[in-house]
Image (tube, rainbow, N blue to C red):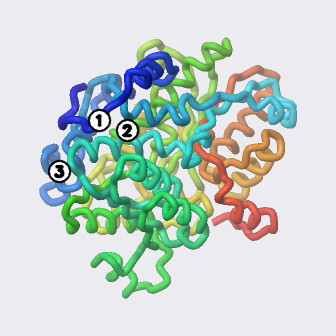
Amino acid sequence: MKMWGQSTFYMSQKTRFDLEQADIPSAWYNLNADFPEPLPPPLHPGTKEPMPPDALEAIFPRNLIEQEISTEKFIEIPDPVREIYALWRPTPLLRAVRLEKALNTPAHIYYKYEGASPAGSHKVNTSVPQAYYNKVAGTRRLATETGAGQWGASLAFACSLIGLECNVYMVKVSYDQKPYRRMLMHTWGATVHASPSNLTEYGRKLLAEDPQCSGSLGIAISEAIEDTVKTPGTKYSLGSVLNHVCHHQTVIGEETIKQLEKAGEEPDVIVGCCGGGSNFAGLAFPFMRQKIRDGKKYRIVGVEPSACPTLTEGELRYDFGDTAETTPLLKMFTLGHKFMPPSIHSGGLRYHGMSPMVSHALKLGLMEAKAYHQTKVFEAAILFARKEGIVPAPESSHAIAAVVDEAIQAREEGKKRVLLFNLSGHGLLDLSSFESYLHGKVQDV
């Protein structure tokens, strides 16, 4: 796919040769090309009619808009992006042998470890190309929101490498709960504000109504978009939900397919946690291609918090992506854009809606969904940490909880199953949450 704009990035011949030899995907996968029914289009927030692409140029550069609406199956990854990817990609696929032994299960448990990235999560798979395409398009500054801070840190990292200013609105409850992610953003040169803030009209309105408002991703999105449209040289960057974000994450699944082939295994069950959908999409979408095209019988499971049960209890309908009703209307599973999620520790999963592509996949029966309470999630996370050594992010621990249940079921049925999940980030900056759990301070809501 030819992208709009002229690249200002240059690479040495040695680096180009190294990339040709590297086992890093050369293209992102677009599930929209294989859906048996087309994805419903976004609607204009005012007219409620299908939104023309140029209407998005107030907040996104044209080259990313082209990816957002693309129906091409594969989108070529620019060499400068692959060069940065090579700092951590390909990420390892590991077998959790000690966890299998602890569960006394015949199941083989594999996990793709995205915590190996510089920012400690999968989010850099999209922050780097988004920063790159914005730089190519002449953007000087990016505004964004973040929940638990994984996305904010990843965008700060990408902007520091590519040379953009980065302004982050961080959901207030996570701003307070996760100070080290905020510090990480500062270290990479970003400016970070607790949301709702007094820097935007919408933030000031909410604080006047409720000075103790703990915030939400929907609120932070509204503030970041208001910042974008009022600040010259600024574009908006989103870490999940939208199509182009899901495309970028598919490097996870593309690598995993090849790694499992080398291991001589094929998954029976594929699991990912779901907040806005990018983590899940990154692992699952390439396997959905194989379900659609090759008739594979994989069970693909999206796991979410019971406190914010978008897929399991939400409605599939058009809704706004933010609380101020400034975004396009997206056809997605939603709890309603005014929904205020409880202050659970998995801040990255506190979003009222779900990626339209993930929502469409659930509607079409390509996947299923489960919800877990956070005490069950932390129980599984502690077990994993004590057996495998990696402290998982609370968000990824939802997938671990589901995999533990699948492994126990395999034990009870006496059947070998191959279980695969995405460990999308480490929990080293979430240790206060684990400490709260270990002292009995984490409650189900």
The answer to whether one can see residue 407 in this image is yes
Instruction: Name the residue tied to disc 1.
Output: 39
Q: Nearer the viewer's eye, disc 1 or disc 3?
A: 3
Q: Amino acid at mark 1?
A: Leu
Residue at position x 48%, y 50% in the image: 154
Q: Amino acid at mark 3?
A: Glu
Q: CA distance from mark 2 to mark 3?
A: 21 Å
The C terminus: image quadrant = bottom right
Marks 2 & 3, CB-CB < 8 Å contact: no
Instruction: Name the residue tied to disc 3.
Output: 57
Marks 2 & 1, CB-CB < 8 Å contact: yes
Please say if 142 is above or below 323.
Answer: above
Instruction: Name the residue tied to disc 2.
Output: 357
Q: CA distance from mark 2 to mark 1?
A: 7 Å
Q: Amino acid at mark 2?
A: Met
Residue at position x 27%, y 31% in the image: 38
Please say if 436 is above or below 304.
Answer: below
Residue at position x 60%, y 46% in the image: 425
Q: Nearer the viewer's eye, disc 2 or disc 3?
A: 3
Marks 1 & 3, CB-CB < 8 Å contact: no
Q: Which mark is residue 337?
A: none
Q: Position of residue 161 (x, y in %)?
A: 42, 47
Residue 206 is drawn in which quadrant?
bottom left
The N terminus: image quadrant = top left
Between 373 and 219, the residue placed more toward the observer is 219
The number of callouts visible is 3
Q: How many C-alpha atoms fall within 10 Å of the one at disc 2: few (<14), some, or many (≥20)?
A: many
Question: Disc 1 on helix, strand or loop?
Answer: loop
Q: Is residue 282 left or right of residue 272?
A: left
Q: Position of residue 77 (x, y in %)?
A: 36, 28
